[in-house]
Each structure stands twice: as structure tokens, then as C-alpha cells.
Image: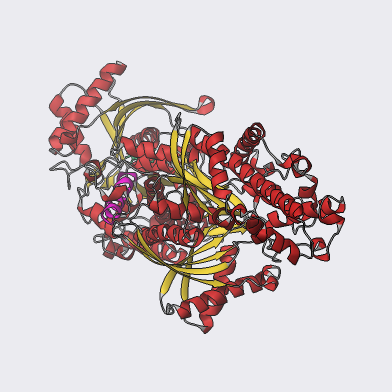
């Protein structure tokens, strides 16, 4: 009779396989970016990426809210290789006014209990990391942050939904900190399913599923990152808290729900919600039994049709009653006793029937649970592309643990539904508390590492104040370089270029240009037209300069250059033409005229002997003479910054500054003659090549130089020189990154503490890799691939750290460069004596052009530090070539005018 009556609650394997398929579809829906918002099974990322590996250690606190009881724990974890841990716990009541009151009271209460616990365990004055087991659906964005999506089970606290529960707990603890001396750091928010998986995972490395069947029901499992749309990154796995209790909230299980399920739902705290949970968890089973018995009695099927007040009362039949009644071994005595207590007068037949009702209800619970678990296991197996899989499921929860037959039934059904999975069910001992400690232990290790990384990178974070200081120091050095008494010893040399005006558009003719001083050596032919057909045409050829020549003798270097020119002239068929030539020579030169330049000192990668102190134009002329094959009219020696300014000035007359952010870093600008003390004359302007790369060589910015900068400097060709350039330019940024990576690896924070052969190689980390790694669109997987190309075998975590290091180094570079530029534009503004300055800066250099953030940060910094200047940045198209030709053209014109 009962069987017929409860026909709907008996689920065949076919139905269960169908439920399993439905749940599989729900999981996919929850994981998808587009489908997640409407999914009922939320599949929440837990930010737990790995199981304990046994190297965890320390003393941890945990509080556990959301199970049948509220508890505080202390867990000691030992990394003695024996998977050893010690657990001490204390239970606290959860009064109804707390779990159905308001948020502030709830968190105060938790803090009170924790304080009490710490007092009893003598833990005050200790700084302990805390894991917070909070077994309600939370949307996490990191391990220590979680916004409550909605209460479940018997909780309904006001003002907590949609807020970060970790923050609330922290605040409550903070309040206590004022009056008591406790210091607790909430490091992880953990769902009880995750805690259970972690606890079992500590003992059994195969454990990758956590299951709770108690007051509530829920499951978590390790999902592949590439399937989790809501979290960036494709590498490795992350534990997903399925929140499967909400399965069916969209009606997906309506065909299986009975009138009793509906009635129970309507009388619950959260009608329409957690429908799957309401068919499974211990919080509802007793009530389901009561509703069934009530109906059966009303229909005269039980107790002679006599309904007692107790049977009419919600919550009168509890889980423990169901448990007791299902103890078949004890016959009917339990059942009889319980029913009698409810003022029902059961016959033996009644007792048998009621016992049967209990069994059907709890069996259905196990069946449904098994079907959903089977779906998870199948997904895991498919993720691993295995035909057969061995795995372990960690389980906790009162229903599973104390019900006399539940576990056995569940195991049996699961094995029937997924015959190709060998499942071990591992009972967790106090899973949620210890598990929170495990998660915390891992988090603690990560947090300690984080602190070390932050400490390493902290010197790269420059405050606005520091940047202002840099700007004003730069200003001081600029003045030093211009003043007669100080210029000889100035580090920012402020070299006059004898370029006195920007092009006016009347320039024309054919010119040769040389570009020496960057990555490539080039020879160019530039044709300039004026008037209505104004245009610039260029032909160029790139030549390599072998390292042995860059760092050989001066004669060899210039012979090589002339050899390249000869090749180019042959190639273009213009050997006999004796064209005017502009020589872009991007090193500091002291000039006495436009075509005389004495090399002050090599920078960047050059170090040829017998050149410093010599006139580079003479050296070039001599080399041409030595070759005795063609002749050239060397008209101008040009710095690349000046070439850049001139190129942009050709388009925009307001361009009076040239900036290079490439291999090196340098700036030129138009200065008023009256400010250039070392030159005669007070009329007009002249372009000054600042050579600001030498800024700081007197130690004036040593306060912001890090040990990594010093190492890069010491390993360079010109130790102690070009300190500012070494913090800001392409030749060095990668090398700074490499130094940091070595240091972090030594501290065991990267690459498993192993410094690979390739990481030891100077120059291996090129600045172009910073650009690639910092590109926003790049997934971590790609970062990893780049690192792999460099011979750096990195994990997902390593890649994140490397990206961070690159970001810190390039940001500082851009900010420092911006601070320097702010000093220049401010000076220009004062020179002109205007309230607001409109000015254009011509820029060249691959770092500026190709790095994903450098130019933006540079511009922002200038804006911040020179708010009275409206600075337009104009990219120069091949400044070194075109600019040199333009300068040559101007110089030629002036020269001709002079001769006439
Ligand atoms: P120059 O040597 O004349 O300054 P560039 O302006 O082309 O020539 O700068 C070349 C330098 O730019 C290289 O030495 C390197 O440090 C850097 N660099 C090269 N590629 C990139 C990139 N993709 N992102 C940032 N910097 C780069
Ligand atoms: Mg260049």
C-alpha cells in the first residue's frame, strides 16, 4: 500500500541515469560565461587550485559556520612527511536570534566565540592565520573574498546577502582587537565541501571530489581551468563548488517532485530555492516524512485516521527520528516509541508502514545524490580522457555518517551508475574545520611568498612625491649643464647642437644619412622636395655591426662604416655623386659647430677604443680617405633626438622637443640662447642635446636605485655611468627583470628555486619580452610559452609573478622618463613666460612604440607632474634618417647663404 502510495519516490536506474544526464548539462551551463547568469547550478570557482602537498606547516585557526553546529578549531600541521596534524575543537550553540537576526550580530557572535576559543586554548597574543568555513553559496573573486549569493538551510540573516563575508568577519575581529589583544588574519574563505575535499586530500592524494550530505547537501570537484570561463587562465585546475542544492530551481526536476516536496518547499524559509537540497538533505527528510504521514492519516491509511496535534506541527519529526525508525535490526520498538511520543497510537501495521515511508524517503535521497555524483565522476573521467578512472570522494555530513544504511546505499548506486569509475569513499574526520585549516595553510604559504615578492618589488613603486622629487632634481641638473661654472662637471651635459631652427618646408635635394648608435647601423638616401610637391622619399639599407667591431678599435669601426657606405652607394648606383651627408651619431658629442663633434664617451653597447675625445666627423673623413674610393660632403653630425625633433618639426612647427625611448633614453629641446652660458650670443634658440641618460651619475637619484639596478650597472660596459638611462631604456629593462627573477628564484619563490642555465645568461631577457608578456590580451598559457622559449620552465603561478615583475620594471621606467620630461616642459613653459604651454614632443624608439603600457604611463606622468603644459606626443617616422637629412639640408642652405 505504501509502495503504491509513494510510487513517485521510488526512482529506477533509468530515471537516475536521466537525472545524471540533466545534471551534467547543468554543470556545463554553470561553467559557461554566457550561460552562467541563468544557470541554477552556479559552479562557483573556489580559488583553491591545488590539494595539500604535505609541505604545509604551522598553527591555524578555523571557524566553521553553516553546518549543524558552529565550531572553532585549532589545527597544527607538521611537515614531517607523515601527513601529521592535530585538531582541537570547541562547539558553540547557534541561537535562533543569531542565525535569523542581523548581520552585525552574527559576525560579532562569531568573533566572540573565536575570542572565547582563543582564551580557552591560551592562544591570545599569538598571530594566527584563520580559515573561515562558510557553507553557503558565495561568489568568490579571490581566496579571501566572497560575496554571499543567498542564504540556504535554516539561515536567514539580514543585511549579509550581496556583501563580502570575509570583510564583515575582519571588521568584527577588528572591533575586538581594540579591546582585547588578538591578532587574527583571515586568509581563506572555504566552503565545507572544499574543506572536506582538502582534508581527505591530505590523506589521499587521489581525492578530487568533496561531498556533503548533512544539514545541506553540496559537492565540489577539481575542474580543468580551461573549462572555467569565469576565471582567467587555462592552466591547471581549480576546485568548483557546484552548489548543486539549487539543481531543479528552474523546474528541471519538476517531473520528479511530489506534492510533499512542493508543500515542504512552500513552508520553508526560501520557497522555490534549493529544490534538490530539499529532496536530499537531513534538514528536510523528517519534515517530508511528517507531511507524508499526515496525508496518509487524513486519508485514513494510518492511525485509524486520527491526526494528533504533534503530527500537525512543523518540525516535529526530525532526522534523528527517521534514523531511529530505520534501524531495522532493532525491530519496531524505536518506531513505536517515536510515534507514541507524537501522540499517535500506532498498531504494528502502522509501525511497519511508517518504517517503510522513512526508508523510501531516505533511499530517494541517496539515489538522487548518487545520480548527481555520478555526473561529476563522469565529467572528471572525460576531462582526463580516461576510459576507466580511479578516484576518491571525500565525504562529510551527518546524514551520510550516522544514518544506518545511507552510505551503503549511496556507494552501491554510484557504482551501478558509473561502472567505469573505481571510487573510494573516504569519510572525512571533521572535514570542514580541518579543511579550512588546510586551505589556509596553503594560502598562508602563498601569502608569505606574496610578502616576499611585494618586498622585492616595493622599491619599484614610486610615489607621486618621489616622482616630483625626480622632476625637480632633473631640473637642477639641467640648469647645472647650462651654466658656465658648473657645466664641466655636470652629469646632464646639455650639449649645444648648432641646430638653431626647425625646418621651414623650403628644404630640398638629395642627401645621404648615416644612423649609428642604435640596434642597427643604416645608410640612407633621402630625397626631399619642397613647395606644392613637398615630400620626403627614403631608401635605406641596414647593416650589422658585429660585436667585435663595436668593441674593437675606432679605426676598425670607422673602416667598417665606410665599407657599408661603399656597399650602399654601389647598390644605389650613386658612387660618383658626392652628396651632402648627415651623420646621425647617437652618443654624447661636444660640438663646436654643426659638422664637428667630439665624442664625450660611449654609451649603450659601444666601446671602441681611441674614439673618446676625438672628432667623429674627422674620423669618418679619415676612413673615407683611407679607402680612397669615393668622396662625401659631411655637412652635419646629428644626435638622434635632434633628428626626431626635426622630423616632427617638419610636420608640426610646435615641436620643440625630441625624445628617444629605444635602446637608450635621451631628450633634446630648443633652448633660448641667453640661457646657454657657454655659447656667445643671446639671440634666438638652439637645440640642446641634454644627454639626460647620465642623470644620477653624481648619485643624486641613488635613493631610488634598487640593488637590481646596481647589479645591472655593475655588469654593464660603463659601470657608474648613465644611471638614469639604465633604469629607463630598452637596453636595460629586460636585464633588470632578469636580476629580479634571479633574486626571487634564490628566495625559492620562482621556478621551484632552480636557477636555470639560461636565466644566468646576461641579456637573455630582452625588453621585447616585457612587451609580449605584459600584453593584456595574452593568456598566462602564452606567457608560459614565452618563458619556455627562454628555457625557463614555469608553472602557472610563476608566469603570474614574472608578468608582475615585468609590469613593475616597465612602469617605473615610464614614470621616471615622464618625470624627466615634465622637468623639460616646465622649463620650456617658464622660458616662454606663459601660464599654459602648448607643446609637441617628437618621439622615437621601439620601447615607446611597441610596449603595451610605456607610452600611456609616460604621458600620464607628464600630465600629472606638469599640469600647466598641454603636451602632444607625435610619433616620428624614422627620425634618425629623415631628421639628419633635414638638418643637412638646412645647414647646406645656411652654408650656401654664408658663402654668397
Ligand atoms: P634604437 O636602437 O635606435 O634606439 P629602437 O628605437 O628600435 O632603436 O630601439 C631598439 C630597442 O628597443 C631594443 O634595443 C630593445 O631594447 C627595445 N625593443 C625591441 N623590441 C621591443 C618591443 N617589442 N617592446 C619594447 N622594447 C623593444
Ligand atoms: Mg634609433
Q: Is residue 126 visible?
A: yes
Q: Nearer the viewer, residue 40 or 768?
A: 40
The quarter of the rendered structure image containing the N terminus is top right
Please tell me how many numbered marks the rendered image carries: 0
88 vs 395: above or below: below
Colour pattern of the rendering = secondary structure
Seen from this angle, which residue lies furthest top?
Answer: 573
Q: Position of residue 835 (x, y in %)?
A: 56, 61
476 vs 770: above or below: below
Q: Does residue 664 appear to the left or right of 547 in the view shown?
A: right
Q: Does residue 245 appear to the left or right of 895 in the view shown?
A: right
Q: Is residue 685 visible?
A: no
Q: Nearer the viewer, residue 704 or 617?
A: 704
What range is drawn magenta here? 730-747
Q: Position of residue 265 (x, y in %)?
A: 77, 52
Q: Nearer the viewer, residue 206 or 442?
A: 206
Q: Position of residue 113 (x, y in %)?
A: 55, 75
Amino acid at each position: 500500500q505504501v509502495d503504491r502510495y509513494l510510487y513517485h519516490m521510488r526512482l529506477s536506474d533509468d530515471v537516475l541515469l536521466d537525472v545524471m544526464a540533466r545534471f551534467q548539462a547543468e554543470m556545463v551551463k554553470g561553467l559557461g560565461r554566457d550561460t552562467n547568469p541563468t544557470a541554477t547550478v552556479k559552479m562557483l570557482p573556489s580559488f583553491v587550485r591545488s590539494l595539500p602537498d604535505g609541505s604545509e606547516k604551522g598553527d591555524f585557526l578555523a571557524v566553521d559556520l553553516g553546518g549543524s553546529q558552529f565550531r572553532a578549531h585549532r589545527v597544527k600541521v607538521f611537515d614531517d612527511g607523515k601527513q601529521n596534524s592535530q585538531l582541537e575543537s570547541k562547539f558553540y550553540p547557534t541561537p535562533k536570534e543569531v542565525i535569523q537576526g542581523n548581520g552585525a550580530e552574527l559576525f560579532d557572535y562569531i568573533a566572540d566565540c573565536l575570542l572565547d576559543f582563543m582564551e580557552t586554548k591560551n592562544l591570545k597574543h599569538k598571530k594566527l592565520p584563520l580559515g573561515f568555513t562558510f557553507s553557503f553559496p558565495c561568489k568568490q573573486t579571490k581566496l579571501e573574498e566572497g560575496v554571499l549569493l543567498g542564504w540556504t538551510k535554516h539561515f536567514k540573516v539580514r543585511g549579509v546577502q550581496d556583501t563580502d563575508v570575509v570583510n564583515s568577519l575582519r571588521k568584527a575581529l577588528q572591533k575586538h582587537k581594540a579591546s582585547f589583544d588578538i591578532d587574527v588574519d583571515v586568509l581563506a574563505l572555504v566552503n565545507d565541501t572544499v574543506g572536506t575535499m582538502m582534508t581527505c586530500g591530505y590523506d589521499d592524494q587521489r581525492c578530487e571530489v568533496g561531498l556533503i550530505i548533512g544539514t545541506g547537501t553540496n559537492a565540489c570537484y577539481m575542474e580543468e581551468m580551461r573549462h572555467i570561463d569565469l576565471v582567467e587562465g587555462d592552466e591547471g585546475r581549480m576546485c568548483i563548488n557546484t552548489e548543486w542544492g539549487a539543481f531543479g530551481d528552474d523546474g528541471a526536476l519538476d517531473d520528479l517532485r511530489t506534492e510533499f516536496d512542493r508543500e515542504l518547499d512552500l513552508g520553508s524559509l526560501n520557497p522555490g530555492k534549493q529544490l534538490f537540497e530539499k529532496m536530499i538533505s537531513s534538514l528536510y527528510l523528517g519534515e517530508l516524512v511528517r507531511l507524508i504521514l499526515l496525508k496518509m492519516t487524513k486519508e485514513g491509511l494510518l492511525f485509524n485516521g486520527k491526526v494528533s496535534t504533534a503530527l500537525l506541527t512543523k518540525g516535529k519529526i526530525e532526522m534523528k527520528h527517521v534514523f531511529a525508525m530505520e534501524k531495522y535490526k532493532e525491530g519496531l520498538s524505536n518506531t513505536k516509541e517515536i510515534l507514541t511520543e507524537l501522540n499517535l497510537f500506532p498498531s504494528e501495521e502502522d509501525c511497519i508502514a511508517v518504517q517503510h515511508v522513512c526508508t523510501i524517503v531516505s533511499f530517494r535521497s541517496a539515489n538522487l545524490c548518487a545520480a548527481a555524483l555520478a555526473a561529476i565522476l563522469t565529467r572528471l573521467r572525460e576531462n582526463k580522457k580516461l576510459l576507466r578512472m580511479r578516484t576518491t570522494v571525500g565525504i562529510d555530513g551527518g546524514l551520510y555518517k550516522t544514518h544506518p544504511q545511507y552510505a551503503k546505499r549511496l556507494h552501491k548506486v554510484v557504482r551501478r551508475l558509473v561502472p567505469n569509475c573505481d571510487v573510494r569513499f573516504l569519510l572525512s574526520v571533521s572535514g570542514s574545520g580541518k579543511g579550512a585549516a588546510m586551505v589556509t595553510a596553503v594560502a598562508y604559504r602563498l601569502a608569505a611568498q606574496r610578502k616576499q615578492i611585494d618586498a622585492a618589488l616595493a622599491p619599484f613603486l614610486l610615489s607621486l612625491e618621489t616622482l616630483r622629487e625626480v622632476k625637480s632634481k632633473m631640473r637642477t641638473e639641467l640648469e647645472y649643464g647650462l651654466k658656465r661654472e658648473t657645466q664641466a662637471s655636470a652629469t646632464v651635459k646639455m650639449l649645444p647642437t648648432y641646430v638653431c631652427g626647425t625646418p621651414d618646408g623650403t628644404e630640398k635635394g638629395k642627401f645621404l644619412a648615416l644612423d649609428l648608435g642604435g640596434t642597427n647601423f643604416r645608410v640612407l638616401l633621402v630625397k626631399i622636395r619642397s613647395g606644392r610637391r613637398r615630400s620626403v622619399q627614403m631608401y635605406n639599407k641596414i647593416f650589422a655591426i658585429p660585436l667585435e667591431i663595436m668593441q674593437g678599435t675606432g679605426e676598425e669601426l670607422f673602416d667598417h662604416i665606410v665599407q657599408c657606405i661603399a656597399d650602399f652607394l654601389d647598390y644605389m648606383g650613386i658612387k660618383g655623386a658626392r652628396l651632402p651627408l648627415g651623420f646621425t651619431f647617437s652618443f654624447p658629442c661636444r660640438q663646436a659647430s654643426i659638422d664637428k663633434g667630439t665624442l664625450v664617451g660611449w654609451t649603450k653597447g659601444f666601446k671602441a677604443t681611441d674614439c673618446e675625445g676625438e672628432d667623429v666627423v674627422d674620423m669618418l673623413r679619415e676612413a673615407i680617405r683611407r679607402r680612397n674610393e669615393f668622396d662625401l660632403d659631411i655637412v652635419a653630425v646629428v644626435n638622434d633626438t635632434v633628428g626626431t625633433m626635426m622630423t616632427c618639426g617638419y610636420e608640426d612647427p610646435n615641436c620643440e622637443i625630441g625624445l628617444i625611448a629605444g635602446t637608450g633614453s635621451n631628450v633634446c629641446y630648443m633652448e633660448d640662447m641667453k640661457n646657454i652660458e657657454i655659447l656667445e650670443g643671446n639671440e634666438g634658440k638652439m637645440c640642446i642635446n641634454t644627454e639626460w641618460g647620465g642623470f644620477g651619475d653624481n648619485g643624486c637619484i641613488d635613493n631610488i636605485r634598487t640593488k637590481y639596478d646596481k647589479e645591472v650597472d655593475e655588469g654593464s660596459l660603463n659601470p657608474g655611468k648613465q644611471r638614469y638611462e639604465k633604469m629607463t631604456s630598452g637596453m636595460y629593462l629586460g636585464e633588470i627583470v632578469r636580476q629580479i627573477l634571479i633574486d626571487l628564484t634564490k628566495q625559492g619563490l620562482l621556478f621551484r628555486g632552480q636557477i636555470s642555465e639560461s636565466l644566468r645568461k646576461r641579456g637573455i631577457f630582452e625588453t621585447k619580452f616585457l612587451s609580449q608578456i605584459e600584453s593584456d590580451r595574452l593568456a598566462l598559457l602564452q606567457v608560459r610559452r614565452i618563458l619556455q622559449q627562454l628555457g625557463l620552465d614555469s608553472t602557472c603561478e610563476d608566469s603570474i609573478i614574472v608578468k608582475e615583475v615585468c609590469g613593475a620594471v616597465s612602469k617605473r621606467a615610464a614614470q621616471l622618463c615622464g618625470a624627466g620630461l615634465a622637468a623639460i616642459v616646465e622649463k620650456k613653459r617658464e622660458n616662454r613666460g606663459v601660464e599654459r604651454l602648448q607643446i609637441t614632443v617628437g618621439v622615437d624608439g621601439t620601447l615607446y612604440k611597441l610596449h603595451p603600457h610605456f607610452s600611456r604611463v609616460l604621458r600620464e606622468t607628464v600630465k600629472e607632474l606638469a599640469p600647466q603644459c598641454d603636451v602632444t606626443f607625435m610619433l616620428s617616422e624614422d627620425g634618425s634618417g629623415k631628421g639628419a637629412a633635414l638638418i643637412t639640408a638646412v645647414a647646406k642652405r645656411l652654408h650656401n647663404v654664408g658663402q654668397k
